[in-house]
Amino acid sequence: MSSQPSNPNGNDREDGANTARKKGLSIGAAAAIVVAIATAVWVSNGNNGGNGTAVANSCPANPEVQTALDEKAIGDLAAVQVTAKGARYDEISFIHENGEEVGFNAFEGNVTLVNFWATWCAPCRAEMPELEALQKDYGDKGFTVATINLDIGDDGLTKAQKFMDEENLSQLPLHRDPTFDAFEVLKKRGVALGLPATLVLGPDGCEWGVLAGPAAWHGDDAKEFVEAALALAEES
């Protein structure tokens, strides 16, 4: 996992026992180490947003989602921290691929995997084809892979577009946040230490899970996780 920002500090938010009992890691082996560190510095959802003012970021806790997805967060996805405890990210905004400034409400209605990446992040680059394949398989089934690029500078968009063109990533959107403010929110929340950073959101925009680091997003474990999430969305 690549990391330019400094590590967050805070209180434990998640019991690491579930992650410790999971096994069968491949690409997730390194990510599991990162998540162990992230768990140690986890902060509560009540932290301030990126602009320094308190924000309302609460949803009802969802024990059913917690239980069902935790059972699927194994193998390649063992580093996923299933939460479903009531977090929202209403303070995050980014530039949609259509040029409009939007928030996560743009994804509501679908189960959404929000992946933050940058061209300078080697693990990000490595997992993008897997995210592309996941979107291709499930994009018409109520599931969305929303990739948000964090390259800053006047040439950030050009770098991101060049990489996506070279890798033939036609299924993934080029949403972007050239301010890097979105990552600062994740850092303050204790969700991310570096990139890539991934959120799993329910159809109502509420956080169902987080991952600090890369994963094999097109493997069997990931597919079972996504299918379980879609089944939960249909039941709600």
Image (cartoon, rainbow, N blue to C red):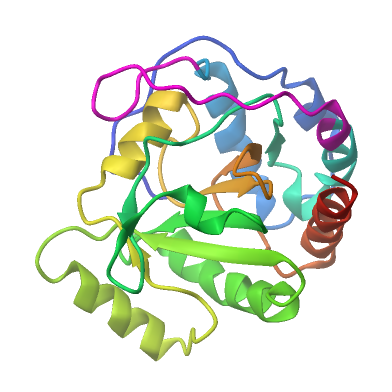
Q: Which is nearer the eye, 157 or 140?
A: 140
Look at 62% across and 65% down and name the residue there.
144
Residue 1 shows in the view: no
Q: Where does the image place residue 68, in percent across and percent down from the top left? A: 89, 39
The overriding secondary structure of the stretch rendered in magenta is: loop
Q: Is residue 91 above or below residue 113?
A: above
Q: Count the numbered circles shown.
A: 0
Residue 85 shows in the view: yes
> For this view, does 5 lie left or right of residue 46?
left
> For this view, does 120 lie left or right of residue 195?
left
Q: Where does the image place residue 72, in percent across and percent down from the top left? A: 86, 46
Bounds of the magenta segment:
46-66
Q: Where does the image place residue 156, in percent across and percent down from the top left? A: 19, 67
Look at 44% across and 69% down and name the residue there.
125
Query: Was residue 119 drawn as part of the magenta stretch in this picture?
Result: no
Q: Is residue 226 above or below residue 22?
A: below
| Image quadrant where residue 166 sits | bottom left
| Image quadrant where residue 50 sits | top left
Q: Is residue 126 above or below residue 105?
A: below
